[in-house]
Amino acid sequence: MKFCNTCVYPMVAATALTADNEGKCSGCKVSEQRETIDWDRRLEEFKKLIDRYRSNSDYDVVIPVSGGKDSYFQVHFALEHGLRPLLVTYHGDAFTNEGEKNLHNMRRVFDCDHLIYRPSSTLLKRLNRIGFKLQGDNNWHNHAGIFTYPIQVAVKHRIPIILWGEHGFMDIAGMYSYNDYVEFTAKYRYEHCLHGFDWFDFTDEGLEKNGRPDIKEGISEKELVWLKYPSDTEIDDVGVRGIYLSNYIKWSGSQNADLVESKYGWKPFESEQERTYRKISNLDDIHENGIHDYMKFIKFGYGRATDHASKDIRDGLITRDKGIEYVNHYDHVKPMKSLNHWLEYVQMKERDFDEIADSFRDPRVWFIRNGKWVKDCIDGELREFGDVLLEKKQREKYKELN
């Protein structure tokens, strides 16, 4: 395994990274661009753009919000610039206590209209089980809802602008340059946010067609109407565009947290987290910092502490040595609080969870030694991380270490 020599990302990652000849990853290189941009000019560009789209409908912009620090900041920014936003939330049935309070506080502190869509719990349990068995992602429905329902709302209410915060794949991995002014697209949603799956893959018919009738849950097309992305014709008729604030202002999650906590009473986590040192991120779902992130470790050998440490290193908040310390302390931890909650929610046994999880390990990362999973760590050590539960035939793609 190779790691960036500036942040702590591995080169085999969920968000594809590249490295230059000096060993610096594409995410770090794009992050450095922020220091060369005339942000005053960018803000003027935003004002001119938004003035062209001040809506004839009842709202100027749709803002997808989770109740997190960044969505609070997006609303704060929109109101500062005289926009009338419609706040839209996909609620995936697993908000943390802090996240739920922050979410419902938004309508009061901002005095904005706020739509919250909550699919049936029975349906969400079935989607959790299918997502986990199909692609090792119990939270697929969450990402699909976040990147579908607000677009449906924009089309329905004829609101031309959707105001997102940062582009995650550009921020983390350097997928684009800040000079690209990248916007939200159906292609980005499908290929990256939804990992190449869509609503039809979760119906009985879709699972049968894709050779997975064994995990059918009786889901029909009608139950997933909220996951149907609008057609190109519908989007073009309204002229919907999804723009990222991080292209127009110097984005900082930590500064966003400081501002909204002092100004609007937003609250971070009260307790320590099992898989990261940060208390300001991913409050909207119990499993984002929990088993959803643990599955990233199972697949690729790193987790949320790597994500957070890399951002903080790039922002000058911590050293790389401190980041490595966080990675070694948190990335491998099995989050029992989140896992026990989810296992009870979907009625699954821990042993079954572990066996299914093992089947998604990336052979570029994971090896086998004496019946244990082994990988290269960022400090140069080979370490063991749990028993191999795969059958002998399934182990063939993993190199056996002596």
Image (cartoon, rainbow, N blue to C red):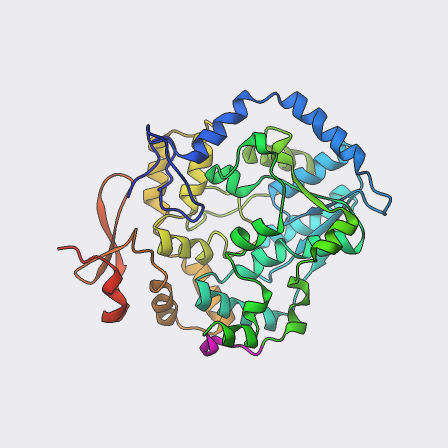
Question: Residue 138: image x %, image y %?
Answer: 49, 63
In the rendered view, would you say 115 is above or below 342? above
Looking at the image, which residue is at 70% across and 44% down?
241
Question: Residue 260: image x %, image y %?
Answer: 65, 36
* Visible residue check, residue 123: yes
Is residue 218 left or right of 343 when viewed as pictured?
right
Q: Is residue 213 magenta?
A: yes
Question: Residue 182: image x %, image y %?
Answer: 60, 38
Q: In which quarter of the image is the C terminus?
A: bottom left
In the rendered view, would you say 270 is above or below 343? above
Looking at the image, which residue is at 43% across and 46% down?
304
Looking at the image, which residue is at 68% across and 34% down?
263
Q: In which quarter of the image is the N terminus?
A: top left
Range drawn in magenta: 212-218
Q: Is residue 284 magenta?
A: no
Looking at the image, which residue is at 53% across and 22% down?
35
